[in-house]
Image: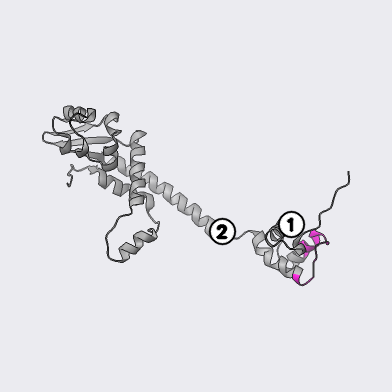
Amino acid sequence: MTRLVPPGFLTFREAVSKLEDAMFAGIPDREEVKKYREGGYSVADGASSRKAADELWNAVDQGRLGAVGIARQPFRINKLPASILQVPALRQTGDFTYLRPGNVAFEEVARAFGCRPATISLAFRDKELGKLCTMLRGTQRRKMRSSTARKVGRPSLGSSVRPSIIELIESKKWASPQPIKQLTSLLNRKLGLDVSADTVARELDKLHDEAGERRFARHRRIRKR
């Protein structure tokens, strides 16, 4: 059944949809969702909707978003007590239809509104939800900026010099008994970089761990006590 609420309010489904847009703006659809949409089907992403609904109820539980019930006959808007908002069926569907006579919540809602709970709409103030959406969009933008910065950042010096380390060893310009400083000097001259000996040593150790070849096993001095 389609729920109608006065201007300035949003139904549960409208609120979840608005939050979902704010939380997942700029994120590509999952492959299974994309496949159905490309096939001409109008489908929603259930996983995204559930996350948005969870975020909505988290905001309600923390007092950042108010939930009200709206009755049409007699017309009434009442703030809903916390005890009602904890009813699992209401949190899952946003609908009072599932409340049955004999249930404590049914009696409480009926007394507060003077009508059957099935005729009441769960609603949220559009202005309050807008503030929550603004906050979530800011969080999402920061996440995307951080992710983009990590992706476009330059590769580590170690990974960039690895091919040259292998080339110098294969061309016999450097061998394991020789000092790391010598390999570092060869690399810096070859690449025009300023790589530290520690970076070269770490990369050489990684090559040895991955390949298990003695040519990558650097000579370590044993300090005399």
Magenta part of the chain:
170-185
Residue found at the very far left of the displayed protein: 73
Question: Callout 2: 10 Å neighbours few (<14), some, many (20+)?
Answer: few
Quadrant position of residue 88: top left
For marks 1 and 2, give the CA distance. 23 Å
Amino acid carrying label 1: it is: Ala
Q: Is residue 16 visible?
A: yes
Question: In x, y percent, where is residue 135?
Answer: 39, 44
**Residue farthest bottom in this picture:** 171
Residue 201, which numbered label?
1
Looking at the image, which residue is at 78% across and 63% down?
Answer: 183
Position of residue 65 relative to residue 15, above or below, is above
Q: Nearer the viewer, residue 186 or 113?
A: 113
Instruction: Residue at 33% x, 49% y: name it.
Output: 49
Q: Secondary structure at mark 1?
A: helix
Q: Secondary structure at mark 2?
A: loop
Q: Which residue is mark 2?
A: 153
Across and down, in percent, residue 44 comes to 30, 55
**Residue 172 within the segment the image draws in magenta:** yes
Other residues around mark 1 within 10 Å, as few (<14) / some (14–19) / many (≥20): some
Q: Is residue 200 above or below residue 3?
A: below
Mark closest to the chain's N terminus, 1 or 2: 2
